[in-house]
Amino acid sequence: MKSALVAFSIVALVFSPAYADDFRVFTSAQGVAIKAKLVGIANGQVTIVREDGRQFTLPVTALSAADQDFLKTAPAPTAARPSSAAGLKPAPSPNDKVSAEDVNAVVGQALFGETSLWDMPAGDVAAKLALPPESKTKNQSSFRSYPKEDFKMFGARPYSVALYAEKDKVTSLSLVFANKGDLFGAAGSGQLHFDKDTPPEDAAKITKQAMDIDLKAITSTLSAKLGEPKKERFGEGKVGRMNMQRWDWRGHAVLLAEAEGEYVGVQIVTTAFADEGGKVARMSDAIVRDQALANLQKRENGDVVIGDIPMVDQGPKGYCVPATAERAMRYLGVSADMYILANAGESGYGGGTSVEMLLMGVGRHIRAKGRSFDSWDGPMKMKDLTKILDKGVPVIWALFSTDEFNNTANARTAKRKTTTDWAAWKTQVTAESQASVLPKDKETGHVVLIIGYNKETNEIAFSDSWGERFIERWITIPEAEQVSQGRFYVIGF
């Protein structure tokens, strides 16, 4: 039974003898079996209780495919709390009699229908809002857009609309309205986010005015049709937990938040998740470690690359640090949002401020979520990177992302895709690396994820938070060292 404890020990909850469903054998994705009965399912997490009364909560995706199929059709356990799973009905709300058409008039978009968002394929929900795919891994997917000025939701203009899903089932919709990042971001995205004007001296005043306008518009729009909101606390940690205004409708909770001086945001989540205050059970280190190792790809040409890392597109603002941290956290089973992380890191207007200051602030938030956060300074060395990457864990690297560096990486990556003679490739990149001159530009401070390496060719693979086109690029270590800030960070377990 010791191995079962290792595989299933996540977060122990209080056992209630009122749960009287039948016991069955659950099997983890690693093949460890345990006899238990179902307690409930919420926000992609399943809670089971063993015969001795020990109760565990773990991600549905940590179970075998057969168990995941069972949970899709499992009846609601006796006395279980309301769940987000399909087929499990939430507690009724006085607003449930409001028609979907009337709620859509409040939303400003044809989002809702007679079928719950939680019972629809994620792609179908994304299509309702014209959200393009942002990322897709084995277990997670996301869709995101940075809408134009004429796009309105809840009576205001959202700067970011993101849909998150697990196993193609929607878990939440996140909208960010007036905020200090997008209000002063650049006109372009990707590496063009460096080309932004200096924020005006009265940026704080402009941000507050814009936030006040959006907060008032959203509150009045929702209240006019769904009544006065409930006031609640939602989220985790000192930074992530904040006051919310809440409206419920047919199993959907609409949560309006104001992070003072930072952003106005709306989240649409299951009422069950809102009832839990947005708290997510922590995935055990043992499961995370196994999943990370399973994502390590070893290619015939000697490349070792970590796969299945979620993409987060930071958009036209300098949010590379919070966006990159969100990617690493979600990869390691920790819920994250780049706007909340930007708040934790005390980012500047437009998203700037020093990389080190931002990461230290974000690091405190990461530790509060139950993950480790370590760093080191110095030259880039293959042996230092491989001891981390070989665990299936990416490394956050601070660098100067200059035009010369990006042009070199883009050209190198394109050539790699057509290469078949890797002995010749080693000779070629060694010569190019020795001749390469990549100047540093302190105005282009940036962070990326180092996700792989090739010892024979002395190359590293890195991934930018600029969308799928930038998910894997290559550069040699000597070239990388020329633009490195000499700082490396690891979110681990």
Image (tube, rainbow, N blue to C red):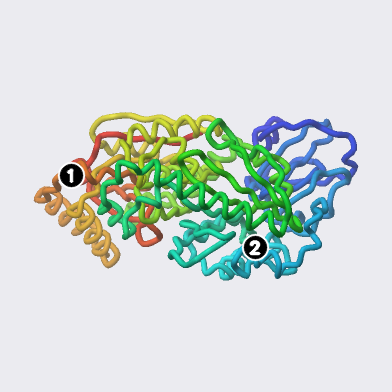
Percent position (x, y) of residue 146? Answer: 44, 60
Circle 2 sits in a helix, a strand or a loop, which is it?
Answer: helix
Left or right: where 468 falls relative to 118: left
User: Is there CB contact under 8 Å for labels 2 and 1?
Assistant: no
Q: Nearer the viewer, mark 2 or mark 1?
A: 2
Q: Quadrant of residue 15?
A: top right
What amino acid is labelled 2 in the image?
Val
Residue 337: x and y in percent read 51, 46
Residue at screen point 43% across, 42% down: 325
Q: Secondary structure at mark 1?
A: loop
* Residue with the mark numbered 1: 441
On screen, residue 225 above or below 83: below
* Residue for point 52% across, 33% down: 371
Could one spot residue 348 in this view of the protein?
yes
Q: Nearer the viewer, residue 434 or 134?
A: 134
Residue for badge 2: 106
* Classed neighbour count for the residue bearing mark 2: other residues with Cα under 10 Å, few (<14), some (14–19), many (≥20): many
Residue at x 55% of width, y 67% of height? 129
Instruction: Compare residues 452 and 71 and report the one nearer the observer.
Output: 71
CA gap between label 2 and label 1 equals: 47 Å
Where residue 92 sits in the image (x, y, percent)?
82, 53
Please tell me how crowded label 1 is: few (under 14), some (14-19), or many (20+) other residues with Cα within 10 Å: few
**Quarter in which the N terminus is drawn:** top right
User: Which of the two residues, 25 or 397, is positioned nearer the viewer here?
Assistant: 397
> Counting residues from the N terminus, which is met first, the one under dot 2 or under dot 1?
2
Q: Is residue 304 left or right of residue 369?
A: left
